[in-house]
Amino acid sequence: MSLIAGSYEKFIWGYKLKPLKSHSSSNHKTLTLTQLFSYPSHISPITTVAVSGSAAASGSNDDTIHLYDLSSSSSLGSLLHDHTSSVTSLSFYTPQNLSFPRNLLSASADGFVSIFDADPFVLLKSFKVHKKGINDLAVHPSGKLALTVGRDQCLAMVNLVRGRRSYYHKIGKEAALIKYDASGDKFFMVAEEKISVHDAEDAKLLCELEGNKRVLCATPGENGVLLLEVRIVILQLGTQTAGSDSDATDDPHLVASASSDGVIRVWDVRMAFKEKPIPLAEAKTNSRLTCLAGSSIKSFKRPQVGNSASKEQNAGMEDL
C-alpha cells in the first residue's frame, strides 16, 4: 500500500507500507511505514489529495494541482491549467479494465468542476456547477457522472460525458462530504454530525445516522460497512492488491489515518471494538496533516503532464 498526505505547511508526504522483517511482541506492530518522499510542492496549505495506482495529485489554496509518480517517488510538477480559486476536492476515475486512471476531476472554491485527461494530463473542460464553493466531489464507478455538494447548500449531478451539470437540488443544509459506495448503487452525504444514505438512482433517502460529534471524514468499506471518524482529520480505506508488491500481504482490513498531530497510523479495522486498539504501524511527519489518500502500487507507465490549452476545445469525455 502507498499513502500520500498533505499538510498545512505545504509539504506532501509519501509512504509505503511494508511488513516488518522482525518485530517485538511487546508493541505488536507487524508493519512499517517507509518514507518515499516529501516535497514542498505548494506555496499554500494543501487541501486535498487523490491516488490511483502510482498516479497521485494534490490540490491547494494556491489554486494549483500538483502531480506525482509514486512508482518512481518523483514530482511531475503542476498542471498548466490553474484554477481561479482554491482546489477543494480531487478524484481519479480508473476503469476496471485499466491499470492507470482515465481521468482526473477537480472541484474548487468558486463552484467550478474541471475534467482532465490523464494520458497525458490535459484539460478537457471546466464549467460552473455551484453558485458557491464546492465542498466535495464523488465520481460514479461507471465514470459517466459525478455528484457534488457545496456551500450553497445544494446537491448537484454532473454529466461527465457531456461535461455539464444535469441536476441541481437545494437540500437545505451544507453537506461537507459526499461518497458513492463501491457498487455505485448508493451514496451518502455528511452534514455536521448527521450521515444520510441515499439511493443513487433517484436520491431517495434510505436511512439517516447521527453521531455524537461532528463527522470529519467517512469512507465506505467492504460489505456495506461505513467507516466514520469524529476526531482525526481524514480517513482512507486501503486494500492491498495481491501480487502488487512482493513483500506485502493481501489484507482487506487495513485502514489508515492522519491526524493534526502529524502522525500517520495504519490499523486493522477489526480492532475497532477494542477499548484501546494498537496501530499496526505509524510514522511521524512533524507536520499538521490535512488530508490523506492511498492505494496499492502496481507497474504503470509514467504519467505525462501535457499542455492544457492544446486539448481544451475537445471538451467532455465522449470516449467513456
Image: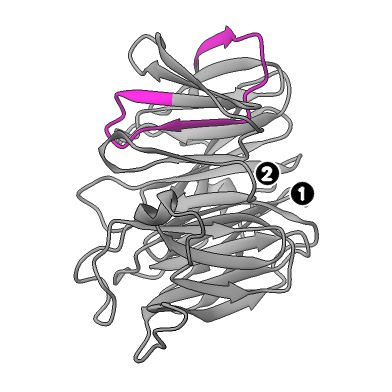
Please tell me whether mark 2 sits on a helix, a strand or a loop. Answer: strand
- Please tell me in which quadrant of the rendered image residue 109 appears: top right
**Residue 274, position as x, y percentages in the image:** 44, 54
Identified at 34% across, 91% down, the residue is 21
**Image height of 122 relative to 217, above or below:** below
User: Which residue in the protein does label 1 denote?
Assistant: 61
User: Which residue in the protein does label 2 denote?
Assistant: 87
Direction bottom: furthest residue: 22
Q: CA distance from mark 1 to mark 2?
A: 6 Å
**Residue 147, position as x, y percentages in the image:** 48, 25
Please tell me whether mark 1 sits on a helix, a strand or a loop. Answer: loop
**Image height of 200 relative to 85, above or below:** above
Q: Quadrant of the C terminus?
A: top left
Q: Is residue 315 magenta?
A: no
Instruction: Tell me the tag on residue 290.
Output: none
Identified at 58% across, 75% down, the residue is 283
Q: Is residue 144 left or right of residue 183?
A: right
Identified at 35% across, 33% down, the residue is 181
Sequence-first tag of 1 and 2:
1
* Three-letter code, disc 2: Val
- Give the residues in magenta: 166-187
Q: Is residue 306 visible?
A: no
**Residue 110, position as x, y percentages in the image:** 73, 30
**Image height of 261 relative to 48, above or below:** below
Q: Quadrant of the N terminus?
A: bottom left
Name the foreground residue: 304 vs 226.
Answer: 226
Q: Are the residues flagged by discs 1 and 2 in contact, CB closer than 8 Å?
A: yes
Identified at 37% across, 31% down, the residue is 140
- Please tell me in which quadrant of the rendered image residue 113 appears: top right
* Three-letter code, disc 1: Asn
Q: Is residue 78 visible?
A: yes
Name the foreground residue: 205 vs 138.
Answer: 205
